[in-house]
Amino acid sequence: MKAMILAAGFGTRLKPLTIGLPKPMFPVLNRPLLEHTLNFLSSQGIQDIIVNVHHLPEKIVEYFGDGTDFGVRLQFSREEEILGTAGGLKKAQSFLEKETFLVLNSDVLADINFDSVLKFHKEKNSCLTLVVRQDDEPEKYRPIHLANNCRISRFVDASIKHPTTNIQRVMFTGIQIMEPEIFSRIPANKFCGTTEDIFPTMIEKGLPIYGHLHEKYWIDMGTRETYIQAQTDALEGRLALKTSPSKNPEGPLVVPPVHIGRDCEISNDAQVGPHAVLGDGCRLRSGAVVENSILWEGATIGSDASIKNSIIGKSVAIENGAQVVDTSI
């Protein structure tokens, strides 16, 4: 099975950090988010992958190349003008149209077995299977109505003509399996969304669209809070990620769990953690505190400065005594 990773977006919710770095390149335990996704796909035998790119594409293309170093065969679909999720799919049609394929958002990490989703998809004779999950507040993600037989009966204000009364409200995870017939429903060279334009029409036509209920780990790293939370989950073992060993120094107060990159300079009376990730070459001066925060490569935290629940960008310097809370810089 081939896969497409949707990575062309602007990452608006994570500005200002995305102004200079596309979200797929955001470090997660000091490796790009997209690298973790490729590792996960490769571990399940999915090696033929296409990634659509638009915002700062060269930063992605130059790092990953043809995918050889990451155990995959990688292609890129460059969008000169952003096309939306469905438009991006249409542009990649020649790569995907020969067989059933997987599509996933680039900012999602999940503990999921794609073979089990594919088996479900085939057993249901589905033309589109959305991986869904229960959530205390499904309205945050535009809720889906799922019938007892897992048929999707309502999605983004569209419904089949005779929906069942036995339903549960779930949310879409950004992971889906599709049949090539979907390409006939997407206009070419036009901005078009799957959840906004294509899926609702398919629901209204009564096409066989099902939801595979996912009950294990899942997170969407589209906000500062969830980006930090994903790394906290990885530090605590709830999310398995391939990464380099932490370089925990002797002397400074290190409150685990933490992950510290190479060549960091940390004062003996600085505090790192809990739930802190330091990129390579970070510097913490005397009395600095970094807690529940992510420092990108080369960040410097001044004397007696405190960083909590925040993201500090590459090579950013925080002045002495600063109190940084709930912020991205």
Image (cartoon, grey):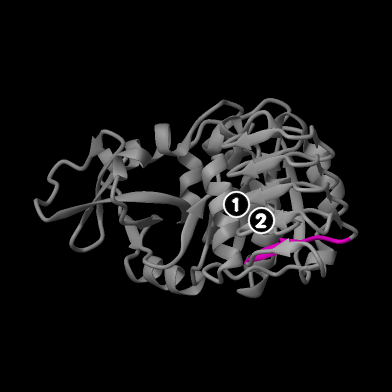
Check disc 1: other Cα within 10 Å, few if <14, some if 14-19, many if 20+: many
Residue 179 appears in the picture as rendered: no
Find residue 148 and report its image quarter.
Answer: bottom left
Q: Quadrant of the N terminus?
A: bottom right
Q: Answer whether labels 2 and 1 touch (C-beta < 8 Å).
A: yes
Q: Position of residue 189 (x, y in %)?
A: 61, 28
Q: Position of residue 306 (x, y in %)?
A: 67, 42
Span highlighted in magenta in the image: 257-262
Say how many tags the image has: 2
- The amino acid type, in three-letter code, at marker 2 is Ala
Judge whether residue 169 is colored magenta. Answer: no
SS at mark 1? Answer: loop
Find residue 156 and report its image quarter.
Answer: top left
Q: Which numbered marker is on residue 292? A: 1
- The amino acid type, in three-letter code, at marker 1 is Asn
Q: Which residue is mark 2?
A: 276
Tell which of 128 and 33 is nearer to you: 33
Tell which of 13 and 41 is nearer to you: 13
Q: Position of residue 288 (x, y in %)?
A: 74, 47
Q: Residue at x 67, y 61 (%)?
A: 36
Judge whether residue 260 is colored magenta. Answer: yes
Check disc 2: other Cα within 10 Å, few if <14, some if 14-19, many if 20+: many
Q: Position of residue 57 (x, y in %)?
A: 78, 37
Q: Classify 182 as above or below 42.
A: above
Q: Which numbered marker is on residue 27? A: none
Q: Is residue 68 left or right of residue 119?
A: right
Tell which of 51 and 180 is nearer to you: 51
Q: Is residue 303 left or right of residue 12?
A: right
